[in-house]
Image (cartoon, helix red, strand yellow):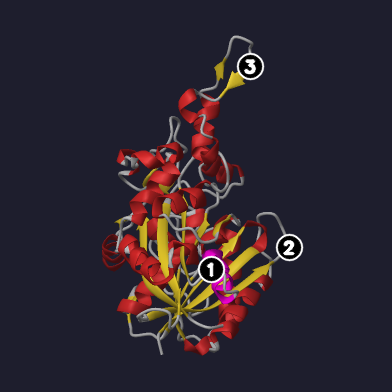
Amino acid sequence: MAPLDVLAYTATTALGAGLDAQRDGLRGRRSGLRRNDFGTDPLDCWIGRVDGVEAITLPAHLAELDCRNNALAWLALQQDCIVQTLAEVVGRHGAERVAVVMGTSTSSIGATEAAYTRLTTDAEGIRHFPADLQRPRIHTPHSLGDFVQAATGLRGPCVTVATACSSSAKVFAQAARLIQAGLADAALVGGVDTLCGSVLFGFNSLQLVAATPCQPFDARRVGLSLGEAGGFAVLERTGAGPGADLQLRGYGESSDAHHMSAPHPQGLGARLAMQAALQRAGISAADVGYLNLHGTSTPANDSIEAAAVAAMFPASLHASSTKGWTGHTLGAAGIVESVFALLALDEGLLPGTLNSEIPDPACGPQIRFDNAQADIRYAMNNSFGFGGNNCSLVFGRAR
């Protein structure tokens, strides 16, 4: 594929708002996980909660779209010169030529949950959402894309991708296709997911939530820690602007079609996605310096992903899961972990795997628990969702 310049990128997670907070947390091996304090009857587990979301006040013209998920989107959007970079891109191409492609798993379902818990009954006995939540635009899967377009004033194609935990990785692929097809010259990509009852109790019903902080690729792991996050990146057709040091070089997508929630037992879909990303980037597996793994800390996911990586990559690869820092941020995992891959490229910061000490026997030498510092040319990110919906991305330094 033709590379796309990455002009700016950011993430807001349980580690804090913006790149400085992510960098400091990764370097200091400081986890953002805490005991669950979300909801009126908190599940006994650990979560990656973003502080300050409840204090966000949206501008008046966005009031109709106010909800916790969009408040987190607004907070993340203000970080690391995203708004300023968008203004420059709009100045070059016009707002109609800049696409918005957002990924989310549950969108604003937290607001819908709240509306159902506060149903009112009218004089005819008909039940309604409370007056303050009678705002149809937030009760749809497209709530996030709608909000980001309204918040930025961009008027190009606007898409919300909802493919579970691969959602905000697939936004990069979607944006690349829109630009390649000539429908846009640049794109704001990203993803946001916030904690809510459906997420916490839904995953718990699948017996996937650990009562203790998650331990990806550790032989003692028992399940995941859920988190919330938001992040963005500004992509532009190479040669259309001043250029950038970092680029999107390839993407790969696949579908296991194996099971609603379990990965293919031989990791077939994961391998196909990784192979396609490498092929589009025009590189070999040996060229990759860092791979951010999906690594959810569930027994099935980690062993299958580790085996797929061991079959494809040399022992020199530094591969890790960063979910011990942020929790599994679901539809936002793709953008957050792409940001970590971009940091690895930009600064040589190769994260290890927090909270893990005893490698699963299924792990090859590629799976690293300790941080490292190294200059690398290419970094990858894996994001795998329910139903075997897989996406791998390759980022690289500009030639």
Label 2 and label 3: CA atoms lie apart by 42 Å
Residue located 34% across and 43% down the image: 53
Residue, disc 1: 175
Residue 369 seen by the camera: no
Mark 2 lies on a secondary structure that is: loop
Mark 1 lies on a secondary structure that is: helix
Residue 399 falls within the magenta-colored stretch: no
Label 1 and label 2: CA atoms lie apart by 24 Å
Say which quadrant the N terminus sits in. bottom right
| Above or below, comparing residue 366 to residue 191 in the picture | below
Residue, disc 3: 126
Say which quadrant the C terminus sits in. bottom left
- Across and down, in percent, residue 248 comes to 47, 77
Mark 3 nearby-residue class (10 Å; few <14, some 14–19, many ≥20): few
Residue, disc 2: 257
Mark 3 lies on a secondary structure that is: loop
| Above or below, comparing residue 200 to residue 82 in the picture | above
The answer to whether marks 1 and 3 mark residues whose Cβ atoms lie closer than 8 Å is no
Q: Amino acid at mark 2?
A: Ala
Q: Mark 1 vs mark 3: which is more N-terminal?
A: 3
Q: Amino acid at mark 3?
A: Ile
Label 1 and label 3: CA atoms lie apart by 44 Å
Viewer-nearest residue: 153 or 134? 153
Residue 202 seen by the camera: yes
Residue range of the region highlighted in magenta in the rendering: 169-180
